[in-house]
Amino acid sequence: MSWVDSHCHLDHVAFKHDLPQVLSQAQDLGIKRFIVPSVGSHRWSKQQDIQEKYPNTYHAYGIHPWFCDLHNEEHLEQLDDLLNNAVAVGECGLDFSPNKPSKEQQMYWFEAQVTLAKKHQLPLIIHSVKANDVIASTLKKQSTCRGVIHGFTGNINQAQTFIKHGFKIGIGTRLLKANADKTKTLLSQLPLEFILLETDAPDGLGRDARNEPKALIVVANAVAKLGGHSAENVLNLNPASGTFSANPQE
Ligand SMILES: [Zn+2]
């Protein structure tokens, strides 16, 4: 069996010097494929380089809510084009924590990307902070969406609403933190089949530590331990093939 890290930013500068080693260490542990979400147009060409060089990386293209105010209509056209060669749209979404672009701007770019996901029949990789209910009501209006709520921080009712709309619940290294009680409570209520494992590398371990895709195994072990499952069963939630049914070459 081989698995996929469903969310890792391999285009991040943190991997500038040793990406081949980072990938081979993960591969040695059975993590054979990598889904790379994008944060904005300033990194699209870097992603395209990686996409070309490493055929086991699968790319999503999108505009992260933190950077949406740096984009214009031309970027939207460019994105539309990039999505012809992508496995998902994202990461996009809403982040209503302080010091972010205005709610109006974020809503505009989120809705535009939901529309593109429908057009290209691609899943969405959604970043949602303090915005689960607004995102749920936006998705409710768009009946054919699917995807993942990445790094999910909500409660079981919100998770169930997303699941009803065809979304998986992204669980990552937040679970490893000392104050992970909320995520642990959620996991005790959430059927395993709705979970999608991710690392969010190089983020996810705090300011000073670089997270890597190989940590997917650590996340799986933590989920397994909480629910009394085998680690193998949990890792099988992220099969290398077909995690997003839009995966090319499947
Ligand atoms: Zn991310």
Image: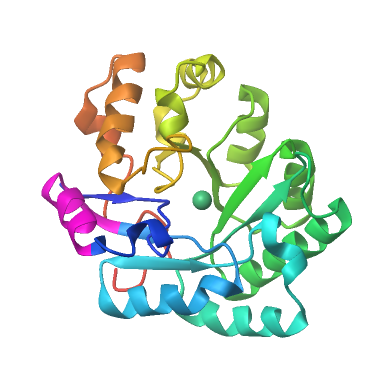
Q: Is residue 27 shown in magenta?
A: yes
Q: Count the marks: how many?
A: 0
For the magenta stretch, what is the residue range?
20-33
In the picture, measured across the screen, residue 5 lies left or right of residue 172, that is left
Q: Is residue 108 shown in magenta?
A: no
- Above or below, comparing residue 79 to residue 115 in the picture: below
Q: Chief secondary structure of the magenta span?
A: helix
Q: Residue at x 14, y 44 (%)?
A: 29
Image quarter hosting the C terminus:
bottom left
Front-most of residues 245 and 215: 215
Q: In which image quadrant can residue 118 be found?
A: bottom right
Front-most of residues 36 and 156: 36
Q: Residue at x 40, y 48 (%)?
A: 202
**Residue 226, image x and y in percent?**
36, 15
Tell me how the rendering is colored. Answer: rainbow
Q: Residue furthest front?
A: 208
**Residue 162, image x and y in percent?**
63, 39
Front-most of residues 147 and 51: 51
Residue 111 visible in the picture: yes
Q: Residue furthest right?
A: 104
Front-most of residues 205 and 162: 205
In the picture, measured across the screen, residue 216 lies left or right of residue 78, that is left
Q: In which image quadrant can residue 247 be found?
A: bottom left
**Residue 67, image x and y in percent?**
68, 61
- Above or below, comparing residue 120 to residue 241 in the picture: below
Q: Residue at x 27, y 58 (%)?
A: 33
Residue 241 visible in the picture: no
Q: In which image quadrant can residue 141 be found?
A: bottom right
- Above or below, comparing residue 47 to residue 240 in the picture: below
Q: Residue at x 62, y 67 (%)?
A: 117
**Residue 172, image x and y in percent?**
43, 36
